[in-house]
Amino acid sequence: MSRPQIVWLRRDLRLADQPAFQAAGSAGPVIPVYVLDDERPGSRQMGGASRWWLHRSLAAMDAELRRHDARLILRKGDVVDQLVRLMDETGAACVHAVRHYEPWWIKAEADLAKRVSLRLYDGNYLVPPGRLKTGGGTAFKIFTPFYKALLNDGGPRSPVAEGNLAFADAWPESDWLDDWKLLPSSPDWAGGLRQAWQCGEAAAQAQLADFHDRAKDYEEARNLPSVEGSSRLSPHLHFGEISPAQAWHALEGMRGEGIESFRRELVWRDYAQNLVWQRPDYPERPYRPEFEGFPWRDPKGDDRAAADLLAWKAGQTGYPIVDAGMRQLWQTGWMHNRVRMIAASFLIKHLLIDWREGERWFWDTLVDADYGNNGANWQWVAGSGADANMFVRIMAPLSQSSKFEAADYIRRWVPELASLGDAVIHDPESRPSGYPPRLIGHREARERALAAWQVVKSS
């Protein structure tokens, strides 16, 4: 009789197009395991919104496994110690896992491989980080040539169907998911998340099917906050409830700017992880060294800067489009992509607060908080990244709001302004009761930001 095979799950919570399940299933009866390890990530343990999603995703996976007369084994603690212990308890022959590239997971994989038989597979990205090289044999730092190289490489592999899996007959002890207390309780701030999202592999497939019917309009619609133009697949992709290869090939045979635009976004996700593969601390330190000495306003030593940061987090900046985005984020764990750029630019360039303050807030509040994507996007807006927008390109939130027709979006998320007409809601002269004045005028903020940039340039 074949010995059991452990499938170590992390951000790959699916059965279809899951190479670790497929390889383990061909070797013996499968025992799926998820270990909650809050120590190895250090300061990068999951934020509140991600933990909420994780609870529901694990519950969905366990329910699906039970349809196969199987279950999901849960353990908490050091992931290497727990997996070694499970190997001893079950007599398993091997641990199978999809390879991860966050620095703490790379270290965990190396530590585990010293103690047990470990087999790693690629499956969370369109192309494994590091595979694509420039003509000079180095890793890509600029997005557009990276994108072209991926297409010239033949694009992503075709996804593999779920297949037939044989699961173990005897099961080791498991923690109870509720005992992990991943869900908020006192207070329960997740009501908006529950209304906004369904989690798990089935929900991911349903969301992909919904987007399939809208994908042709993606290029234009994705920039309109008042329109449901985004794919809303990002948290499903982050937790691996669906693979990027599945999302890519679901649009096979379709043509048009919308399809190409969506695929570019999938490739950007690969590109961001490619940057982390080269620089593991990419979300922690500016890529461009001149930004190390940038004269940010420090919320830890400047009371006004601290108050401005709190106002930004709470959606109380006095700029309707920024406030709408920040409130959508707090209530639903997600923010429209165009508004993410506007809100990030406002923090960095209008408030002159270090981009890492914003990255950390997004890390805690986004259901799709991704180490690579989050860091790459914030550095892009700040101008400090490998391939980034120039710092001197300062988004004007009022004109952005009007240009991208955000009136209905503002009405939804900033109810104090709901009675205002389209002509004034982006920049109301009179402030309705309860809505704050602007933290700073746009011209004043622009001049201050450019002066700070001159300090960096001259030094």
Image: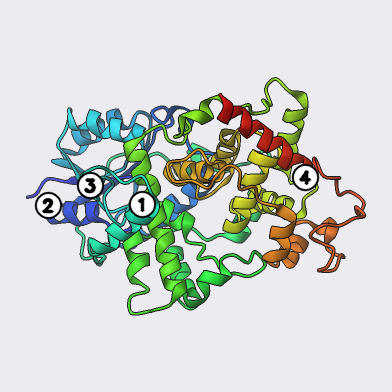
Query: Is label 4 in contact with label 1 (beta carbons under 8 Å)?
Result: no
Mark 1, Cα crowd under 10 Å, few <14 / some 14-19 / many 20+, is many
Q: Please say if 231 is above or below 107.
A: below
Ranked by sequence position, the earlier of labels 2 and 3 is 2
Residue for badge 2: 27
Query: Amino acid under label 2?
Result: Ala
Q: Can residue 336 be seen from the camera position used here?
A: no
Ranked by sequence position, the earlier of labels 2 and 1 is 2
Q: Nearer the viewer, mark 2 or mark 3?
A: 2
Q: Nearer the viewer, mark 4 or mark 1?
A: 4
Residue at 46% from the left image edge and 44% from the top image edge: 376
Residue at 46% from the left image edge and 34% from the top image edge: 288
Mark 3, Cα crowd under 10 Å, few <14 / some 14-19 / many 20+, is few
Query: Amino acid under label 3?
Result: Ala
The secondary element bearing badge 4 is classed as: helix
Q: Rounded to the nearest whole Å, what is the CA distance between mark 1 and mark 3?
A: 39 Å
**Residue 443, labelled with which disc?**
4
The x, y position of residue 330, in whole percent, is 66, 48
The secondary element bearing badge 2 is classed as: helix
**Residue 54, labelled with which disc?**
none
Residue for badge 1: 270
Mark 4, Cα crowd under 10 Å, few <14 / some 14-19 / many 20+, is few
Residue for badge 3: 170
Mark 2, Cα crowd under 10 Å, few <14 / some 14-19 / many 20+, is some
Residue at 65% from the left image edge and 33% from the top image edge: 353
Q: Please say if 442 is above or below 450.
A: below
Query: Amino acid under label 1?
Result: Asp
Q: Residue furthest top?
A: 301
Query: Amino acid under label 4?
Result: Arg
